Image (cartoon, grey):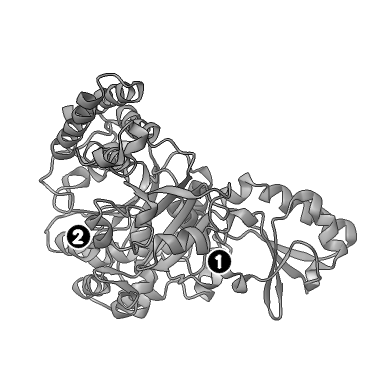
Amino acid sequence: MSIQVFVPRDSSAISLGANRVAKAITNEAAKRGVTIELVRNGSRGMFWLETLVEVATPKGRIAYGPVNPEDVAGLFDANFLQAGDHALKLGLTVEIPFLKKQERLTFARVGITDPVSLADYIAHDGYRGLKRALGLSGADIVKEVTDSGLRGRGGAAFPTGIKWNTVLNTPADQKYIVCNADEGDSGTYSDRMIMEGDPFVLIEGMTIAGIAVGATQGYIYLRSEYPHALQALNEAIDVAVANNYLGTDILGSGKTFHLEVRRGAGAYVCGEETSLLESLEGKRGIVRFKPPLPAIEGLFGKPTIINNVISLASVPIILDKGGAFYRDYGMGRSRGTLPIQLAGNLKQCGLVEKAFGVTLRELLYDYGGGSATGRPIRAVQVGGPLGAFLPESQFDTPLDYEAFAALWAVLGHGGIVAFDDTVDMAKMARYAMEFCAIESCGKCTPCRIGSTRGVEVVDKIIAGTDHAANIQLLRDLSDTMLNGSLCALGGMTPYPVLSALNHFPEDFGLQKTEQAA
């Protein structure tokens, strides 16, 4: 019987040599006359250990990493196929502290299964949620999602059940399910990891959504820079169609749901739901006025559910185990789990799925291992390029939507980017304005012009030109963008700018006592 060896096909792992390691293992096994079954799984999310190689044993999977192609011969010499000792041996994968302390609900299969194997998916509780949903009314499905407390994981944190209920109760001859997979925030990759590592869970979640509200067509609007996700999704969709989990008469239920992947055009603003709809319709991606809401007049003017990848991928476990099961994780009004992405100046960058309530300090030090440079962590930006910068004094804040809002910060998509004490926060504020200027769709003046003027004003502050007047001008400009922009791109750019100015005034040439001026 051949021994199973697992090497990730995740694009982060590939960038760190996973394909070369897989080829080296195959070649070495052939050379030695050893029969193995090489499984290309998703990444476990421990990127400092990639390429992570796992071997199936009677006691469980044994991990080795980080493995380079030149390490492979030595692994065979050490009899790693029978869990032999080697300098790269990490022991049982599930016992690695970074993994062991997580609550993996949405990511339950990522890194464990072959992403495009339907048999693997079903063997690990896949499609149980859909099978239960097929026996419920649309209203009952929506009630389960509502009862779970699931909120949008794309940034706005809007209650998912309310959005679904609106579409359910809006009469129309056609309804749509649209997945926002245009993951463009800096330091975020959880959507990509799901799509590459467990595409069936997204397909199942979208199918349940379609059955719940009577939508027969779905679209995944995929970030153009994700070719590996495109391949995995299309392969999984073909398998689902061939096995009657998608298409007409799903599993003999009489229900219909069709699904396609559409590639985005590379614009950050198309992560905003109405810009996404414009792009999906073949138009220039610019923001629509609201109302009407997309739930009432969305894609092609029809009622449309638009949810983020993680929101939709959380639905199958909610339908399988019930809304109460999911709601029992978390705190306050933030229920369930959040896949947190650690990036920036950290020793251990990777994905951590935890129930809401874990603190930033725990994530940065217990999981991230502190800064990669060994210097103090001075600031973290949470929620992408439009998220606020938090100083060390706020690191004990729990990950909770309301706790972050109280600090004038956002959780967003769960991306955390860390900076040590060498960071220049005035330059980071400038970058935020410049990012907005580059990515603005140009429809509204506060965003289009405000961000361009913002770069100029920050440059004057850094140069010390008319310092006090320009500090005040930056605050006034931020207030205009915050309250006058049509969408979150211009409306949230003041978050990083003002948080940098308020928490790190010395980087703007101010004394600590001047920060409230």
Q: How busy is the neighbourhood of tag 2: few (under 14 within 10 Å), some, or many (20 plus)?
A: many
Front residue of 213/314: it is 314
Is 243 placed left or right of 172 in the picture? right
Residue found 67% across the figure and 54% down from its top = 51
Q: Is residue 214 above or below residue 20?
A: below
Extreme residue toward the top, this view: 465
Judging from the image, what secondary structure is the residue with disc 1 in? helix
* Mark drawn on residue 470: none
Residue 78, quarter of the rendered image: bottom right
Quickly name the residue at label 1. 98
**Given the image, on which type of amino acid does mark 1 rest?**
Phe
Report the quarter where the N terminus lies: bottom right
Of the numbered discs 2 and 1, the one sitting upstream in the chain is 1
Residue found 35% across the figure and 21% down from its top = 463
Q: Is residue 104 above or below residue 238?
A: below
* Mark drawn on residue 163: 2
* Foreground tag (2 vs 1): 1
Is 432 placed left or right of 44 in the picture? left
